[in-house]
Image (cartoon, grey):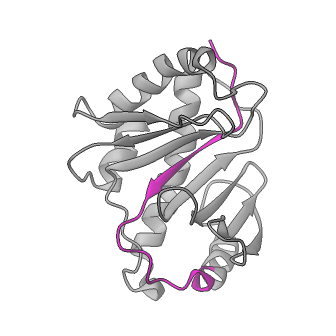
Amino acid sequence: MMDLHKFGFKFFAAEADELDILELIPLYHRWIQQNALPDLLIDVADYSHVPAGPGVMLIAHEGNYALDEGGHGRGVVYYSKRRLSDELSARLCLVASKALRAAKLMCEDAELGGAVNVPGNRLEFFANDRFTAPNTDAAYAQLEPALKTFLDRLYAGAPYTMTREADSKERLSVRVDTPSQVPLDTLLARIA
C-alpha cells in the first residue's frame, strides 16, 4: 500500500477563462478573515505571472488552495503539504473534500458573479511526492486500488474514465471524466 501524503485534487471549472484571476486576491483575504475553510489559512500568493501556473494561491498550514491554470484548463485545486492519518482511500476523501469545499465557496461567491462553475464531472489527482509516488507503472499499480475505491464512492457507481499521465518526467497524475455533471453538494455528501 502506498504511503502517500503530499497530493492534491483539481476539479475542473467550466467557462472560467473569462475571470480575471486577480479577483481572487480579495476573495481569499475575506476567506482568511472569516475562517471560511477548515484549514489554518495564512496568506495569499500571486503567481498570476507564471504561464499555466497556480494563479493566485491561498496558503494554509495544512495545504494550499488555488484556481489553477495549468494542465488541461482552469480548476479549483487543493493539495496537502502535511502528513495525514488514516488509510490512503480516506486521505483521498479528505483532500478531495477540501478542494470541493473551496470550489463550492468560489461558485457561490456573489462578488465573482457566477464566473466560476465547477460541474463536478472532471477532476485530476496528482502526487506531489516523486520519491513516494514516481510516475511509474509500479507506483500507479500501488495507487490505483485506493483511487478506484475513492472514485467509486465519489461517483456512486456512475461510469468514469481514468487517464494516467504518460510522460514519466511529469508527476504521477490521473485525469478522471464522467459523462454527467454532479452537484458539488452531492459529491461532498458522498465522501463525508
Where is residue 40 drawn, in percent x and y?
74, 57
The N terminus sits in image quarter? top right
Residue 65 at what x, y percent from top left? 64, 60
Residue, x 46% and y 84% (percent of image)? 112
**Quadrant hosting residue 24:** bottom right
Q: Is residue 8 above or below residue 150?
A: below
In this figure, what is the number of numbered marks?
0
In what quadrant of the picture does the C terminus appear? top left
Region in magenta: 1-24
- Residue 18 is left or right of residue 53, and the answer is left
> Above or below — where is 136 with respect to 120?
above
Above or below, 70 against 63 in this view is below
Q: Is residue 92 positioned above or below 184 on the image?
A: above
Is 22 magenta? The answer is yes
Which percent across, then down, holds residue 87? 59, 20
- Let me know if residue 180 is in the magenta part: no
Q: Position of residue 92 (x, y in %)?
A: 54, 33
Kindly identify the residue that appears in the image at 41 percent across and 24 percent down: 148
In screen coordinates, is 191 left or right of 4?
Answer: left
Query: Which of the two residues, 59 or 2, is positioned nearer the viewer here?
Result: 2
* Left or right: residue 154 compared with residue 165: left
Q: Which image quadrant for residue 133?
A: top right
